[in-house]
Image: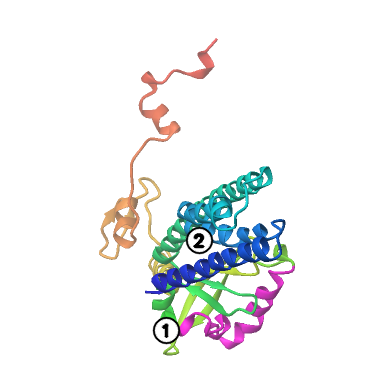
Amino acid sequence: MEINRNRKYQFFIIGLLVICSYVLAYYFQNILKTGQIYTHFFYIPIILSCIWWKRKGLYVTGALLGMLLVGQMVYFQYDIRIDDYVRAFMLVLVSLIAVGLSEALAGTKQQLLDSEIRYRKIFDTTGTAMAILDENAIISLVNSEFVTLSGYSKAELEHQISFLDFVLPADQEKIRAYHHSRRIIPEGVPNRYEFTFVRRNNDQRDVLATVDMVPGTAQSVVSLSDITELKETLKKQKKLQSELSTALAKVLSGYIPICASCKKIRDEENNWVQVESYLSEKTAAAFSHGICPQCAKKLYSEFIPDKSDTP
């Protein structure tokens, strides 16, 4: 509907300009008896029609040329002179240049549009929450992951909320300083940092932020990875390791009876067992067997050459 409405306005404007061109031609030729100025007005409808309609705009050029050459003989009773052909040639040349520039501009515009669609698709389908912030930290654009993380809708976020509203109050001043310093001395600001993200329901999540400037603009793009579960897992792992270390220390603490000859260990039931059996039972350790160089020489000396005999 909007395109059709714009097209109607364009037809109306071009039609009005063409009519004005005919009126000016009549006025200058029949009343002022001169043809030196009025054709300059022809460039306005010609350029506009070629920009708006590209090659179809050449029909307007043809209509004005017909009025300039044929109409001059039929309606204005003037003979066509060499300067009329020059003016006609200039009108055609300007039309072709306008069409070429318009088509080149349209091609470039389409490439930019395709590029924007492609990168917007990548932006929206990436696995992390992403947002583009203006120089005042107002959110300009978000992807679906950011919508999910924040708990707000896209309409509620874009151009409405400051990114700092999602930062825990204790961290706001630090991140505000990062945001402004990044636009002055970007080298002095970390591009990766952790902070506590506050969702709409006041649920708090630990996130890792990766931030960088959008080249040639005052905007920055921030990518957020929710690391809450990862940090919880690391805490549990650290706690488990501490508990295992404590348990192992208790199991292996004190005096352990060991044979001075065969090195077997006496367990709680007064049974003498191999060292590896005892440790495997008490810990999570597993053993593999091999022979050290000294034992190999002692047990298999006939298969191991004596290095002292080597010339």
Question: Amino acid type of disc 2?
Answer: Trp
Question: Amino acid type of disc 1?
Answer: Tyr
Say whether residue 63 is left or right of residue 24.
left
Which residues, given as a range, are shown in magenta?
156-184
Q: Secondary structure at mark 2?
A: helix
Q: Secondary structure at mark 1?
A: loop
User: In the picture, residue 6 is in which quadrant?
Assistant: bottom left
Say whether residue 35 is left or right of residue 256.
right
| Secondary structure mainly formed by the magenta segment | helix
Q: Earlier in the sequence, mark 2 or mark 1?
A: 2
Residue, far top: 311
Mark nearer the viewer, 2 or 1: 2
The residue that disc 1 covers is: 152
Q: Nearer the viewer, residue 60 or 22?
A: 22
Find out whether residue 268 is within the magenta segment.
no
Find out whether residue 183 is within the magenta segment.
yes
Instruction: Identify which residue is drawn at 44% across, 74% down.
Output: 146
The residue that disc 2 covers is: 52
Instruction: Give the class, few, some or many, for how many residues have Cα within 10 Å of label 2's Cα (few <14, many ≥20).
Output: some
Residue 182 drawn at (x, y percent): 68, 69
Instruction: Give the class, few, some or many, for how many residues have Cα within 10 Å of label 1's Cα (few <14, many ≥20).
Output: some
Instruction: Identify which residue is drawn at 37% across, 19% down.
Output: 302
Residue 294 drawn at (x, y percent): 45, 32
Q: Nearer the viewer, residue 234 or 64?
A: 64
Examine the rendering and report whether any part of residue 229 can be seen.
no
Instruction: Identify which residue is drawn at 48% across, 68% down.
Output: 10
Compared to residue 48, the image places residue 140 above or below, namely below
C-beta proximity under 8 Å, tags 2 and 1: no
Examine the rendering and report whether any part of residue 70 can be seen.
yes
